[in-house]
Amino acid sequence: MLLLSNEDVERVLRMDQCIVMVEEGLRDLGTGQALDTGRSDVYTANSQSGLFHRLAVLRGANRRSDVMSVRIMSDMASWTEGRTEDKYCVKPGLFCGLIMLFSTQNGEPLAIMHDGYLQHLSVGAGVGVGAKYLARKDSTTLGVIGSGGQARSMTEAVCAVREIRNIKVYSPTAGHREDFAHWVKEKFSAACETLDHPRRAFDSDVVITATNSVEQPVFDKDWVAPGTHLTYANYDELDGGIFAKADLACSMLPNNPESTPVRGPLSLAHGFTSWAVATEKELKIIPRRPKHPVPEAKAASIIDIILERRKGRTSDKEITVCGAGGGQRITIVGGMVYRLAKAAGLGREIPTEWFLQDIRD
């Protein structure tokens, strides 16, 4: 079995590859060759008030590539008065996120890898696929709310599918948006303007929101102009009224009841299916925001648009919205990373026998 670090993943994974693979994974979901069970969380209240351990699990399988994946994240989570989420593992600045890959041919554990770099690029790639099918083909301007790693990968993906010439970035921290602008100027042939208010970011053809906001929208629906393609990393960032205003709102999951994740007893932070070991009083600490209904006539899966089962953008004046994410991207991109890393001799080989036993459960 192969043990791969973020550095190993970065050496073999590029955004253009990632966009191709994520689109293939979405096609596989739509044609019954893949499965995405969604994410589920388990919260355990901590002896420190307001602090919770959260174990998050995502699973996916792809029959065509013979790979099944499990992504596991172990975080200590808390929420500020401003309703942003803080998290760490062991101590601030460290995180535990692992992807395990298994062969669907014989059950063999194939790899364990850090999830950080693959997560950022594959979420970005989902944004790239959405922009490829929904953003106006003549889009040249990009507005970005957020300046961290996820905002950067989403920006890279949009630039990969559209000829972006001008980027505007807003972050509440001036130094962060200046760092983002410096990164843009080094990486792309595009100008980058820093903003001290998010409103002007919406004077753009494509708008990205990538923040750690919880229960707090980062924009007003009235800022979104006709013709805009809006894409987001975090549902809590949205002004829920955008779904009524938009002409089309796409998810990354099939519009198929059999593909909908099993519902748990709780809907907590970010709305993921959740369980908890905590008192009712403790649970009140965890923020939650009800999902805003999408009018049925406007709701779609990006998969149906890719497979031409449904039309996407039909005019330059339409507002389109598309989420990012989905566990299938972890499966198909993880499988590609494993094959490339193995061929390149990267990572650390550890005996598969360590993970096998002769006692049946």
Image (cartoon, grey):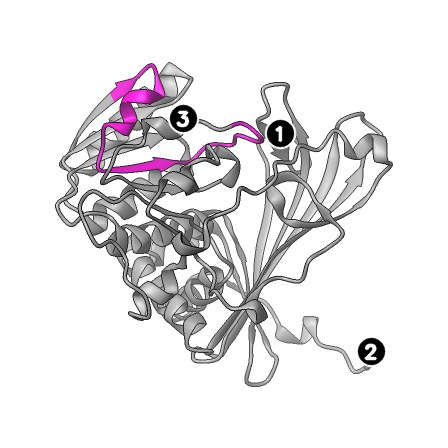
Marking on residue 220:
3
Marking on residue 39:
none
Relative to 263, say whether 232 is above or below. Answer: above
Magenta span includes 265: no
Mark 3 nearby-residue class (10 Å; few <14, some 14–19, many ≥20): some
Q: Position of residue 186 (x, y in %)?
A: 21, 33
Residue visible at 37% across and 17% down in the picture: 175
Left or right, 153 with reference to 104: left
Residues at marks 1 and 2, CA–CA distance in whole angstroms: 37 Å
Magenta span includes 202: yes
Q: Nearer the viewer, residue 289 or 24?
A: 289
Give the residues drawn in magenta, as a range. Answer: 194-216
Q: Position of residue 76 (x, y in %)?
A: 69, 36
Task: Answer with the quarter of the image where residue 182 lies.
Answer: top left
Q: Amino acid at mark 1?
A: Pro
Residue visible at 45% across and 27% down in the picture: 218
Relative to 110, say whether 252 is above or below. Answer: above
Mark 1 nearby-residue class (10 Å; few <14, some 14–19, many ≥20): few
Helix, strand or loop at mark 2 = loop
Q: Nearer the viewer, residue 181 or 238?
A: 238
Earlier sequence position, callout 3 versus callout 2: 3
Q: Position of residue 192 (x, y in %)?
A: 21, 26
